[in-house]
Amino acid sequence: MLDALVAGAAARGGPLPAGGPGPVAVRLRAAVTPVLPDTGTGAAEALTTLVQAVAHGAADPAEPFCAAHLHCPPLAVAVAADLAATVLNPSMDSWDQAPAASALEAEATAALAAVVYPDLPAPDALVTSGGTESNQLALLLARERARAAGGPGVQVVCGANAHHSVHRATWLLGLPEPVTVPTPDGTMDPGRLDAALAGLHGPVLVTATAGTTDSGAIDPLPDIARVTTAHGADLHVDAAYGGPLLFSRHRHALLDGLQSAASVSLDLHKLGWQPIAAGLLAVPDSTALRPLGHHTDYLNATDDTEAGLPDLLGRSLHTSRRPDILKIVVTLRALGRDGLGALVDNVCDQARRFADLIEGHPRFTLYGRPVISTVLFRPEPATDDQVAAIRRALITSGSAVLGRARAGGRLWLKATLLNPDTPTDRLASLLDVVTAAIPEGTTPR
Ligand SMILES: *Cc1c(COP(=O)(O)O)cnc(C)c1O
C-alpha cells in the first residue's frame, strides 16, 4: 500500500492531476472496472491498483501549492493512531463495544473542553464529524433549551460571513431562516447586531464566527458577547477554523470572549493536522447535553446503566461511531501544547510572509493582512471573470490549487496555508506559478 501511494504520487507529479476531470475519470474507470468481479483479484492486486489510482488522482494537501481549502496534511503520528483505531474498530455507542476507547473519550473531551473554558469547573465536549455537525448540534441544543422554556423554537441570528452549515442546520431542524447581519467588512459589527436583536422577541441564538472560511476573519467576540447578553440571547461561536489558536501562546488572545459562548465548534482536521474526521462541540457544563439523552434497550438498558455501565448513546446523534478521539489524544501527547501551538504559529507566520511577498509584487493586490492563515489576493488589472479563469487554469494544469472568495464586492484568489513545512521560497514560487497563468493582455500596474 505504501509503495502504491508513492507510485501514485510520482505519476501525479504535482499537487493535483493534470488535465481536469476527464482524464481522471478515464483512468479511474480503467482501474476500478469491474467494481464487483465474479472472482476476486486478491488483496495485493486490489490495494496496489486502487490505492495507486486514487493517489495518482489526489489533491495532495501535503504539496505546498495545494492551498485552496481548510484541507490539511495529516500528521504521520495521527495517521498511525487512526490505523490502530481502524484495526481495533471500537464503536462508541455502547460501553461493551468500546470499554477503553469510551473511557479515553471521557477523559480527553473534558480536557479539551477545559482548553475552551479554562475558568469553568466541569466543561464538556462532544466528538463530532466536523464543524457542520457541531453547528447542527449547537442549534439543536438551543432549540431544545427554548422548548424546555415553553417556547416553540429559537431564532438564529448570524453574520453574512457565517458558514453555510448554519443556514442548513436551521432548515434541517425546522427553525426559521436565520436573521442575517450584513458584514461588509468581513466581520459582524456589534452595533448592527444590537439593531438586529432589538427587533426580535423570544429565544435567540447568536452565531458568531472565529475564523471565516473565506478570509479567516474573527468576529469581535467580547463585544458580540456583551451585546448578546444585554439582549438575553445565547451565543454560539463557530471556531471550526480558528479554535486551535487556543494552543498558541502568541495568538490565543485572538479568541478572548470565547468563554461567554453557550457552545463552541472546533475542528482539529483543519488547524490540528488530523485526518478527517476530528470535530468537537464544547459546552460549559455536561447538563447542557441532556437533551441528547436517548434510550434503547440493546445499547443502554436502564438496569445496565443502574448497574454502572456508562451510557454513551447521549454523546452523539450517530449510533456506530469511530473512536476519532484516539488520533487526537495521541497527537496532543506527542506534540504537547507547545508543539501544536508552534505548528499553528508557523502557518500564521507563513501567511504573513506570503502577504508581504504579495504587497511587494508589481502584479498583485492584497485584500488585507491575514488574521489566521488565509491570504486573499488578485492580479491587477483583471476582471472577476479573469480571476476565476486563472484559478481554473491552475487546477486544470495541475500546477497549483487555490481557492476563491468574494470580498468587498470583488473576486479574489485564496491561499489557505496549512502546511507547516512549506519553506518561504516555495511561497515565492507559488506567486511565479500564478503570474504565469495570468492571461495575455492584462498589463502590470
Ligand atoms: C470548515 C468549517 C465548517 C464546517 O466544518 P466541517 O468540518 O467541514 O463539517 C464550519 N464552519 C467554519 C467556520 C468552517 O471553517
Image (spheres, grey):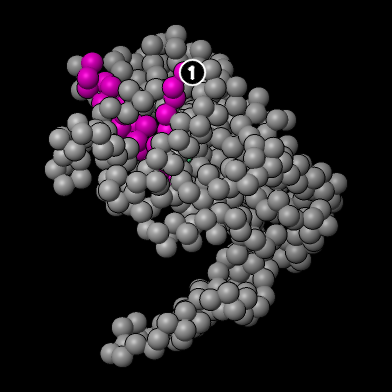
Whether residue 228 is in magenta: the answer is no
Residue 426, given in percent of the width and then of the height, sits at 79, 59
Left or right for 222, reference 299: right
In the image, residue 280 above or below residue 149: below
- Front-most of residues 437 and 232: 232
Q: From which residue to which does the magenta span run?
A: 120-149
Residue at 48%, 37% (x, y): give it.
108
Whether residue 139 is in magenta: the answer is yes
- Front-most of residues 379 and 418: 418
Residue at 15%, 34% (x, y): give it.
302
- Front-most of residues 121 and 72: 121
For the stretch drawn in magenta, the main secondary structure is: helix
Which quadrant of the figure has residue 122? top left
Residue wearing tag 1: 120
In the image, residue 225 above or below residue 212: above
Q: Label 1 neighbourhood size at 10 Å, few (<14), some (14-19), many (20+)?
A: few
Residue at 64%, 70% (x, y): give it.
398
Residue 161, given in percent of the width and then of the height, sits at 51, 35
In the image, residue 375 above or below residue 147: below
Residue at 51%, 33% (x, y): give it.
112
